[in-house]
Amino acid sequence: MNKLQTLKKGRNFLYIDGTNLLAGLIEIYGFKKVPRFKSVMEDFKKIYAFDLIYFYASYTPSTPQNLKDKKTKKQIQEELIFFNEAQKYPNVTFYKGYRSPTSKKEKGVDVHLAVDIVKDSFLKRFDKAIIVSGDADFAYSVEIAKKLGRKVYSLFIPTRFSFAIAYQSLSACVINYNGIFQKKYKLKNKIASLRIINIKKPRS
């Protein structure tokens, strides 16, 4: 299995759309068996080498109304566990967004991640970057980073895959938990650089 070559410390950055990642893991395993953050990072390191991690997420507010809804309550509990583990993980910079009081949607997170990739590319802060997200909106940031001479790779879990990001990346990889990637996505348009790696379930 090929790995990215580790350069001097601080030059290989991992950018994680944390809210997107957790939602995908919940979709695969359910609330009771969500893998631990450390275990997921161990799987990521089997694919790509990285020195620093930038993690972007927002917590669902623990309002009385949210706590009355069983699904939302479980979501809040998993966020507390998974995101707090991420904050304690070595070499992680955690960006905390917020939720709109009216629409309840996440705010500030996606823009911050997209701008950081472009800014860090322009400032030549990294030699290689790996983006973890299934949100196609980040494809433009990857394209800009590429035009600025940076090498950007993408890493996906099977329920959070973006053709647009994979296409713009130097290479892309899917960690195919539970072997569900081919069932969920019909690869009519093949991406030459795409690798699908089957890995056993992470520790929950």
Image (cartoon, helix red, strand yellow):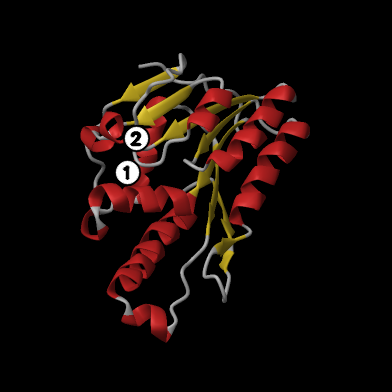
Q: Disc 2 on helix, strand or loop?
A: helix
Q: Farthest residue toward the front?
A: 188
Residue 153, percent from left and from top: 53, 26
Quadrant holding the N terminus: top left
- The residue where tag 2 is placed is 43
Q: How many other residues sit within 10 Å of disc 1, few (<14), some (14-19) or many (≥20)?
A: few
Question: Could you tell me if residue 143 is visible in this image?
Answer: yes
Residue 43: image quadrant is: top left
The residue sitting at 47% across, 24% down in the picture is: 172
Q: Disc 1 on helix, strand or loop?
A: helix
Residue 196: image quadrant is: top left
From what the image shows, is residue 107 above or below residue 49?
below
- The residue where tag 1 is placed is 39
Question: Could you tell me if residue 204 is visible in this image?
Answer: no
Front position in the image: 179 or 150: 179
Q: Which mark is residue 26?
A: none
Front position in the image: 86 or 20: 20
Q: Farthest residue toward the right?
A: 123
Q: Name which residue type carries label 2.
A: Asp
Residue 93, percent from left and from top: 58, 51
Residue 91, percent from left and from top: 53, 45
Residues tagged 1 and 2 counted as in contact (Cβ below 8 A): yes
Front position in the image: 16 or 187: 187
From what the image shows, is residue 108 above or below residue 10?
below
Residue 44: image quadrant is: top left
Q: Name which residue type carries label 1.
A: Ser
Q: How many other residues sit within 10 Å of disc 2, few (<14), some (14-19) or many (≥20)?
A: some
The residue sitting at 47% across, 74% down in the picture is: 61
